[in-house]
Image (cartoon, helix red, strand yellow):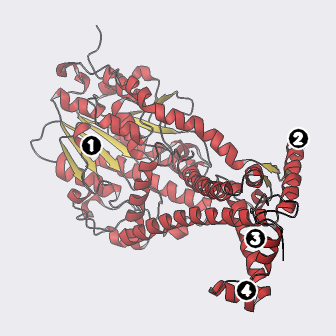
Amino acid sequence: MSHLTPGRLPDGTADPDTGATAAEGSAARREPAGPGRSGRFRRRYPRGARCAAAGATVLAAALLLGAVLLPDRLDSLVPGAFLRLPAEGIALAALLLVLPPRARPVCAAGGGFLIGLLALLKGLDMGFHEVLLRPFDPVLDWGLLGNAADYLRETSGRTGALLAATGAVAGALAVLALTTLAALRLTTVLTRHRRHAVRVTLVLALAWLICVTLDLRAGGVPVAARTDADLVGERVPQIRASLADARVFRRQAAHDAFAHTPPDRLLTGLRGKDVLFTFIESYGRSAIEDPATAPRIGAVLHESTAALRAAGFGARSGWLRSPVTGGGSWLAHATFRSGLWISNQQRFRTLTSSGRTTLTGAFRTAGAWRTVGIMPGVGRAWPEGAFFGLDHVHDRARLGYHGPGFGWSQVPDQFTLEAFRRLEFGRRGRGPLMAEIILTSSHHPWAPVPRMTDWRTLGDGSVFRRIRKGGASAEEVWRSPQSVRAGYRDAIEYALRSVVGFLRRYGDEHTVLVFLGDHQPVPEVTRNSPRKDVPVTIVAHDPKVLERISGWGWTEGLKPAADVPVWPMDAFRDRFLTAYGPQPG
């Protein structure tokens, strides 16, 4: 019988890890397992129990290692990215080994949870880089997740969107739970084999320092990794800037050069004209300059310039730099209208709750136009329409379309323009119109793409059922970068032919058309180009309209030259209102 004091080792000291005596520890090891199922399993199958425990430990280590080394871009997601030494993992192991026993589980759970959060953040970064060519903003981008859900609902149906959202939430919770449990599991193992764990941790730390000092690389990637540390280091300044963005934007919005312009001095150079502002979804610089799309799109623009000239129309084209790329169309639309750089949802909300004079709102303020919006992408209430100065908004339901959808786009561009003529442009006895028209057929995923049909046969859109059946599926289009670019090219060509066809068929000497892209397409098309330029064109039958912008240096025709200066999109409102306001002298 032992005469040692309970809680003491043979030398009279407490065990630094468990607080138990050596005799108690030995007795605990000899003590049979408890009455539970796991205990019975261990007694009956000791070898199987040991294998299961070892397997659980290996899986926990692999999970944490994978989460820590997970890159934040899909193109970096290669096997070599996970064959590195993570500084964060070594530091966490060292911390757990020096902490007192009671603090270890708390630290382990917190560390595992944080590793899971950072893994989720890197997952979001992957998606944002693939679509928007930038990382996820933890302060300003949460609203975009709702837009992603809307996109899924439009392309996959309500059930598909619900399943995807449920899966995303469940997956996120599972990641957090598993990384937390994995960290606790490894903490138990480290404590049980503390002496060996200390040695291994010291060796790994020394190896990491050597790799950093010698800049050792495998496949061009540093062997010594600090992925999560770098991620946090990059995000801290970003979060600070995002939190301060509201104050910066309020200062910018406080200046409005046209806030107090009398109505009779607004847009005097366009009185009596029908002015149509038309956005072509994803019509970016890549459509005109990328080798995969440029020959066909260039031919369409050249042919259309000649056809419009024969009909008596002239055109001037330039470039605008959009605040977004790959998506976020409404932010680009708001930038174009407001003369402010609207690059996130916070700025959009601040803008739409202000009294800012917008480009479209200036037409209503002038009192010489009926202002309307043609919005095939709007399927629910859109209160922002009133802020942007639109007297009446024709959303998807009011366009009268009864044909099939084409990917995300529910209404083909040709039908949208014909509906505008039927509802507004072709009405007898009407006065001048200002219309904002959003064309959506060139919206990602470009599968299937509508085709031009006889304007006289459009009817209620049922004619597109046959065209829809013959189109390519999203799976076919997205099987390779080449087929994606081909689908994008076909969609832009269709949009351009719809716009030009409408103008040739229905335009007259009073028509002024401004059409532009809202942003560049997704990186699969742009080949990850950082450029955010979009073409913008003004077409008019009256030469005096184009004379007003003769000093802009824009290219004659529908295709802007490569060397035309690029304006930021928020500069357009002031330049347009100045050009078409009262002229000096």
Q: Quadrant of residue 84?
A: bottom right
**In-front residue for pair 410/511:** 410
Indicate the position of residue 497 as horizontal and vertical percent values: 39, 51
Q: Relative to residue 43, is residue 66 depicted above or below?
A: above
Indicate the position of residue 87 as horizontal and vertical percent values: 77, 49
- Disc 1 marks which residue? 384
**In-front residue for pair 514/23:** 23
Q: Quadrant of residue 433?
A: top left
Neighbour tally class for label 2: few under 14, some 14-19, many 20 plus, Cα within 10 Å: few
Instruction: Say which residue appears at 73% left-offset and 80% top-offset.
Output: 52
Query: Is residue 229 something one can see in this rendering?
Result: yes
Spatial CA span between label 2 and label 3: 30 Å
Q: Amino acid at mark 2?
A: Thr
Of the numbered discs 3 and 4, the one sitting upstream in the chain is 4
Q: Amino acid at mark 4?
A: Arg
Query: Is residue 517 something one can see in this rendering?
Result: no
Q: Amino acid at mark 3?
A: Val
The kind of secondary structure element at disc 3 is helix
Which of the labelled discs sits on residue 213, or is there none? 2
- Disc 3 marks which residue? 58
